[in-house]
Image (tube, rainbow, N blue to C red):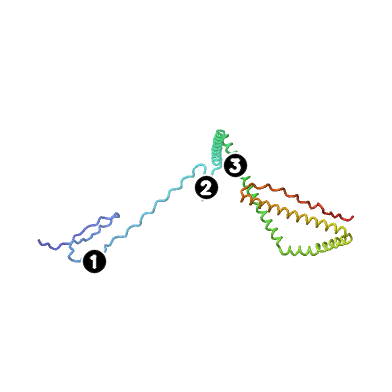
Amino acid sequence: MAIGPVRPRRAVAPTADNGAHPEVVEVRTDLSEPAPPAVPATTPALPPPPLPPEPLPPPPPPPGATAGSGTREWFLPDLAVGATIGAAGAAAALVGAARRAATRTASDGPDRAARLGGQARDRLADVAQRGTEQRERSRRWAEGVLDAAGTAVATSPIVNRVIDLQINRVLRPLVSSVLDDVLAMLEAEPDRVRSLVRGQREGIVDDVVAHIRSSATIGDATVDRWTSRILRRKPAPAPDPDPVPSPDDGAVQISEPP
């Protein structure tokens, strides 16, 4: 079926709150042709908004405090009462804690005392052991330092040079003077020198003879032992070695001249 041209309809906008005339808006339902440009409607100026209400006055300050410029001033009696109540509460809590501590201490007093005594003894033993170890370590360290220092001093070229100088300065003149005195005394008393040489000669000969005898005895014993082992017979008992003469036998003692 054919549809004829659609006529535009008019819509009426709701009335404003200020009682202005309603605005007429044209609504097109035919989309085949472009709509003409909209013409802004002329509306009367709105009245200014009303002023906000005035703020309420501030409430009065509570009792015990006065409002100032940015600070708060406390009432002294209230402070005193609050401090007294706080102190009383703290004192009561302290008394209760002390009473509980006393009760707990009285209940486990002996065990705690024994435990503390054992801990103290262990601590003292540890301290004594540490002191002993440190003393032994210090002694070894001191001995090592002293040995190293003594070795360094004894092998020092300076010390050797000092000793050589002292020997050349003291010992050599002393030995020379004593040797001169001894030679002068022997030259003055030749009989004593002869007896001394004779006694020393006899002592030396006796020592050589004793050494030869002991060596021969040991050799004879060795030969007898090997012979008895080869022939399978009982070895003869070894004779007792001759006593070695004492150096005092036959020696002449030299007495110093009065």
Furthest toward the left, the residue is 1
Bin the neighbour count of mark 2 within 10 Å (Cα to Cα): few under 14, some 14-19, many 20 and up: few
- Closer mark to the observer between disc 3 and disc 2: 3
Q: Find residue 240 and report its horizontal and vertical position in percent.
A: 72, 48
Q: Amino acid at mark 2?
A: Arg
Determine the image quadrant of residue 109: top right
Q: In the rendered view of the protein, which quadrant contains the C terminus?
A: bottom right
Residue position marked by numbered label 2 in the rendering? 72
Q: Find residue 228 and report its horizontal and vertical position in percent.
A: 63, 49
Q: Amino acid at mark 3?
A: Asp
Q: CA distance from mark 3 to mark 2?
A: 61 Å
Left or right, 166 with reference to 116: right
- Along the line of sight, the residue nearer the viewer: 117 or 143: 143
**Mark found first going from the N terminus, 1 or 2:** 1
Q: Residue at the location (72% across, 64% down)? A: 157
- Along the line of sight, the residue nearer the viewer: 212 or 226: 226
> Can you say whether 62 is above or below 144 in the image?
above
> Can you say whether 112 is above or below 35 in the image?
above
Left or right, 141 with reference to 167: left
Residue position marked by numbered label 1 in the rendering? 37
Q: Find residue 126 and report its horizontal and vertical position in percent.
A: 60, 44
Indicate the secondary structure of the residue bearing disc 2: strand
> Can you say whether 59 is above or below 93 in the image?
below
Determine the image quadrant of residue 152: bottom right
Residue position marked by numbered label 3 in the rendering? 122
